[in-house]
């Protein structure tokens, strides 16, 4: 008997200048949840600057890698497989022949993206996770550097330049001054760089993610998740200068930095330095979403694209893991009187916490708070700033009565200010109280009423319903304390 799959997987094979990667995603989700992710380093673009042709050895490796990835995709029964080739195949004189061989051998269709299409796909990738992204997306690969403006959920001006780390290394060798000259020559031709001033610069690409790991290490940032890691540009420039002065052995010691990336790090750092100085951004944000995620997003049905990515992820997690998934929206509405005048941003985070507040019910009680905290803090596909990650994780940690004195709680506390911490504690304690009142079952909270006048908190419950015949719980007092009010009144009506 064939088991019906829950997912509608879609596959994307990205044939880049340095590596080839297969990503298989859950096609029924709003955000690209990776079901499978594998990379093969083939260096197709190595030596292209002189020969104008693809690396012969890399072509053999790439042919084998694509064959494996196509076979895996078919075994996974993907609904759709997109095979995309970028700068190396696009610019090589033998690129069309290589594509023809792939298509004939594996009975597939390969789409060679133009520079503009590659830039737009990178921008769409950032917008997939961060719809309100505002600034310039910079996507660095092995063969090219794409720059594209993003604002109001869409992309604008864009350019592609042959400044990928492989191309730049071939053009300049170990001569930093020459590399700087090449970079400067191309950046001077970009007419829209000044549009980045005072806005965000979104850095995309594996080489820049390696730099993000070094920034995290050097600043002792409490969270090692790369997506949406943000840093002040001046601090980034200081660390980039430090990278330039480090030996290969020293860079290899940084946790999470691949040895294969170390050789290209000085050039990648120089490129990022010059892009930062040219755009003068207010914030440098590293994004794990790029061209592949942009392709995924572009193919989504409009009804899914319109969903909030964070709330969509949380709702999906609730559907899969909560005892009663519909309870999350009830929790959101029930505790609303505790947050008069809250901003849309704060309401969004509170809603996310409500949706995932019961997905850890089957963890061992002694470790429930800790497990919930770590999983929510480190999810790889939330598309939110680290501060927001910390707020959601810490809220659910409070819902499970987590202890602030633990080392993991301090990770979140370091990222939050006093206002954030109070909101998290109030929300988390209210969640615990709501689950106590209702047993987590749907439709019971609707029979109760939560009132807050700044002095007392009042909970009204129907006196004739035995479901609410509970003794005063310590959570009542904890909620009153978190709110800073006099007391909490439990009233039957």
Image (cartoon, helix red, strand yellow):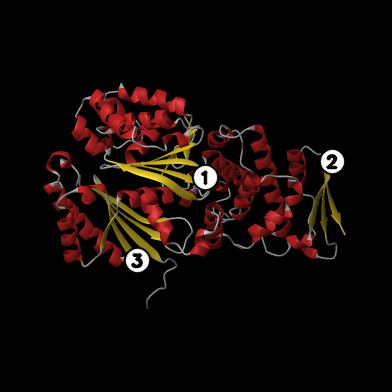
Q: Residue at x 58, y 53 (%)?
A: 356
Q: In this view, does 125 lie above or below 188?
A: below
Q: Which of marks 3 and 2 is nearer the N terminus?
A: 3
Gap in Å between the C-alphas at discs 2 and 1?
34 Å
Which of the pair 262/235 is nearer the observer?
Answer: 235
**In x, y percent, where is residue 133?**
50, 44
Q: Find the residue positioned furthest to the bottom.
A: 1
Q: Tell me the element at label 3.
A: strand
Report the mark closest to the observer, 2 or 1: 1
- Residue underneath mark 3: 80
**Mark 2 packing: few (<14 Cα in 10 Å), some, or many (20+)?**
few
Whether residue 400 is visible, yes or no, is no
- Give me the C-alpha separation between circle 3 and circle 1: 28 Å
Question: As drawn, is 322 to the left or to the right of 475?
Answer: left
Q: Residue furthest right?
A: 493
Whether pointer 2 and pointer 1 mark residues with C-beta atoms closer than 8 Å, the reply is no
Relative to 227, say whether 109 is above or below: below
The kind of secondary structure element at disc 2 is loop
Residue at which label 1 appears: 384
Q: Nearer the viewer, residue 465 or 232?
A: 232
Residue at 22% from the left image edge and 57% from the top image edge: 66
Residue 47, horizontal then vertical, whole percent: 15, 40
Which is in the foreground here, disc 3 or disc 2?
A: 3
Q: Name the residue under label 2.
A: 455
Can you give x and y, in whole percent of width and height, for residue 324 in the image? 61, 63
Q: Which residue is drawn at 73% across and 51% down?
A: 336
Say what secondary structure mark 1 lies in. Answer: loop
């Amino acid at each position: 008997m064939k088991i019906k799959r829950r997912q509608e997987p879609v596959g994307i094979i990205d044939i880049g200048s340095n590596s080839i990667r297969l990503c298989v995603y859950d096609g029924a989700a709003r955000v690209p949840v990776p079901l499978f992710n594998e990379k093969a380093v083939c260096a197709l673009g190595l030596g292209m600057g002189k020969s104008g042709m693809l690396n012969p050895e890399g072509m053999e490796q790439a042919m084998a890698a694509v064959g494996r990835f196509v076979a895996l995709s078919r075994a996974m029964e993907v609904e759709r497989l997109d095979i995309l080739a970028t700068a190396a195949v696009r610019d090589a004189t033998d690129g069309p022949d290589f594509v023809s061989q792939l298509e004939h051998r594996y009975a597939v269709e390969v789409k060679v993206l133009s520079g503009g299409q590659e830039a737009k796909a990178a921008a769409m990738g950032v917008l997939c996770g961060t719809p309100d992204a505002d600034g310039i997306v910079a996507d660095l690969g092995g063969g090219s550097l794409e720059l594209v403006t993003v604002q109001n959920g869409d992309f604008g001006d864009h350019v592609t330049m042959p400044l990928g780390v492989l191309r730049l290394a071939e053009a300049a060798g170990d001569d930093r001054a020459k590399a700087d000259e090449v970079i400067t020559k191309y950046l001077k031709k970009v007419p829209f760089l000044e549009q980045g001033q005072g806005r965000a610069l979104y850095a995309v690409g594996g080489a820049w993610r390696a730099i993000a790991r070094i920034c995290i290490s050097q600043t002792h940032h409490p969270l090692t998740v790369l997506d949406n890691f943000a840093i002040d540009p001046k601090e980034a420039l200081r660390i980039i200068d430090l990278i330039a002065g480090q030996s290969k052995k020293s860079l290899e010691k940084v946790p999470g930095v691949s040895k294969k990336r170390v050789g290209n790090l000085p050039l990648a750092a120089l490129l990022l330095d010059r892009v930062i100085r040219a755009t003068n951004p207010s914030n440098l944000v590293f994004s794990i979403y790029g061209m592949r995620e942009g392709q995924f997003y572009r193919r989504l049905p409009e009804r899914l694209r319109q969903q909030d990515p964070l709330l969509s992820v949380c709702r999906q997690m609730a559907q899969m893991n909560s005892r009663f998934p519909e309870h999350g929206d009830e929790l959101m509405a029930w505790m609303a009187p505790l947050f008069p005048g809250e901003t849309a941003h704060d309401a969004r985070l509170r809603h996310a916490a409500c949706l995932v507040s019961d997905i850890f019910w089957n963890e061992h009680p002694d470790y429930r708070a800790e497990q919930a905290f770590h999983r929510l803090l480190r999810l790889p596909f939330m598309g939110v700033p680290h501060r927001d990650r910390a707020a959601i994780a810490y809220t659910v940690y409070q819902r499970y009565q987590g202890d602030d004195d633990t080392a993991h709680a301090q990770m979140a506390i370091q990222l939050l200010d006093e206002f954030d911490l109070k909101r998290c504690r109030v929300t988390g304690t209210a969640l615990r109280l709501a689950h106590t009142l209702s047993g987590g079952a749907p439709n019971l909270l609707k029979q109760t009423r939560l009132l807050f006048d700044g002095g007392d908190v009042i909970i009204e419950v129907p006196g004739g319903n035995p479901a609410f015949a509970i003794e005063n719980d310590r959570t009542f007092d904890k909620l009153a304390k978190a709110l800073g009010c006099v007391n909490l009144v439990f009233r039957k009506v």
